[in-house]
Amino acid sequence: MHTLIEFAKPILVPLICAVVIVAVLPLVAGYIVLLERKLMADMQARLGPMRVGPHGLLQPIADAVKLLLKEDIIPEEADKAIFWVAPLISVTVAMLAMAALAIGPWFQIADLNIGLLFVMGIGALGIFGIVLGGWSSNSHYSLLGALRSAAQLVSYETAAGMAIVGGLLLAGTLSTREIIQTQDDYGVWFIFAAPVGFFIYAVASIAETNRAPFDLPEAESELVAGYMTEYSGFRWALYFLAEYTNMVVVASIATTLFLGGWLRPFAGTKAFDFLDYLPSLLMLVFAGYCFYRVPKQPVKIQQAVLAAVGLLLILLAGILAAPLLVPAGSLVADAKAGLHGAFWFLLKVGLYLYVFMWLRFTFPRYRFDQLMHLGWQFLVPLSIVNVMGIGLALVLHRQWGWGHLPAFGLTTVLTLAVAGWLAWAGEKKEKQRAIVGEEA
Amino acid sequence: MTGNDLQSYAPLLLHLTLAMALSGVLVLLSSLVGWRRPSTTKSQPYECGITPTGDAREPFSVKFYLVAMVFILFDVEAIFLYPWAYIFRELRWFGFVEMILYIGILLVGYFYLWKKGALDWNRPAVRRDRAS
């Protein structure tokens, strides 16, 4: 028996992680949708979903059941085999990209030495699902959506890839685990060393996940639903699952590379150790709000559900607080790294997604030529300059003995100057075009 | 701990199988549970209520091909930067100068593309230019 456990051990941890990711991600995606609807409602002074469960908390589950029961239509003219496979490709690939990401020091499916390259490469395969789906539907809207999506992904992939190189220069490794370790050693997150790189990656990652304001592939006012016009029922849901999984993936990449991964803010400073209590306190505050809202629910069942959610949050708070309360050295105290690491990582991913949604509700949709202009004539040159700037800063720091602040400050200012010039040139061109257009 | 051998890739296969199984099972389940009442109108492509005309797979703008070609150039460049970033610490300033040269050559190509208008999506067609 013992030897069997020893034999199974190297595969057991990845197996558990993989099962958790595959089982939990659909649920998480559903709740991200709920969060998005709630946020959108809040920003538009509405209530959002309120009926299914208290504050709409069971809405994602109801939606999933509804989608399962929906009729699954395959158009007559469609290329059936490809139509079948396309959403599966999207979902599988998006989930596979999660494999190399470390959600806390304990939770990782495979610690690859090419970690980030793997995530980027596999993530880029998702375009096949979209293009094949759009093409096989044999509908004009689908084809146009797929083409737009392809052009858009391809344009921003380059900028995102090069923005990541900026971070890699600082880390000197591709393994996600070691990248976070390096940030721990330096005592500074890479967003402060490469702010421009983070900005480029943030913009490019919104475009890569087809989110507003870059959601042209599914622009509902022009293309109905873009590449998924002909999809219905659960196949359609799979596309959505893929989109939200991709959002989590890009947010995780940004968190790993620029936001310090699972590190607590001020991880190395003893004076900030009180931040360790923040996770439990946060959970307790949410739990308190839940209990505060319980008497205001109209139906008995809803009261019960909300109370159950509150209790669950208290349980989570207890789990997160336990390692801090027991003396060091025991197994429970050792669990702190894994538990708190996962909490901080997920919190950062959540904040990144929140900014995604915030941008979606704030900005109007781009026009396609503006999109291509931003990608090719602003982000791509800027990302090249950014890489060279970080390289220069590192050379100044390592070879010529400059301090961190002057070296990175100088190159950041230089990069920002180039960004300003690029923006100015684009603006000028746009104005010229407007004048030409008036004459014609 | 980073495994350098192929063994560290084994969990990926596991994960791939699981992910494929999940999506496959979900689709199968929905086709088993969901109802089916096919009709001719339903199986037509949706074009906002107007009867669709012709096949959707028609020729489309050549600009999409152009973007794809430019992408291949620049993505190969980006991928080439990855190993460089990986060993940048050992290369020291020699690596930096080398990369400046490489990117300089690429930037020449980039500006050529820019001036040619390959990066400009709504560049007016050449013929219309001559007419005006």
Image: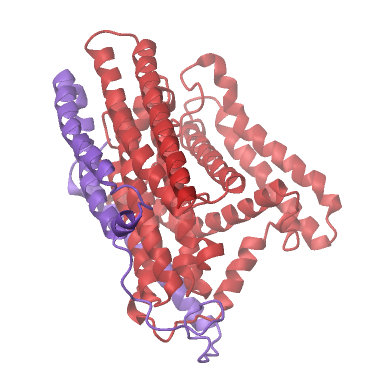
Foreground pick, A196 / A279: A196
Say which residue appears at 51% left-offset and 60% top-offset: A219
The color scheme shown is by chain
Residue A191: horizontal and vertical position, in percent? 43, 27
Which corner quadrant of the image does residue A30 belong to?
Answer: bottom right
Q: Left or right: where does residue A177 sit relative to residue B74?
A: right
Q: Is residue A99 above or below residue B45?
A: above
Residue at the spot x=48%, y=86% of the render?
B43
For residue A260, what is the image quadrant?
top left
Lateral position of residue A229 relative to residue A180, left or right: right
Residue sitting at x 41%, y 19%: A187
Q: Is residue A183 above or below residue A434?
A: above
Q: Quadrant of residue A173?
A: top left
Given residues B59 and A177, the one toward you in this image is B59
Residue A2 in the image: state x and y as whole percent.
31, 50
- B98 vs A205, left or right, is left
Chain letter tied to purple: B
- Name the side, left or right, on which A115 lies relative to A50: left
Q: How many numbered discs, if any? A: 0
Question: Which colour denotes chain A?
Answer: red
Residue A111 appearing in the image: no
Whole-percent x, y for residue A11 in the image: 31, 52
- Quadrant where the N terminus of chain A sits is bottom left
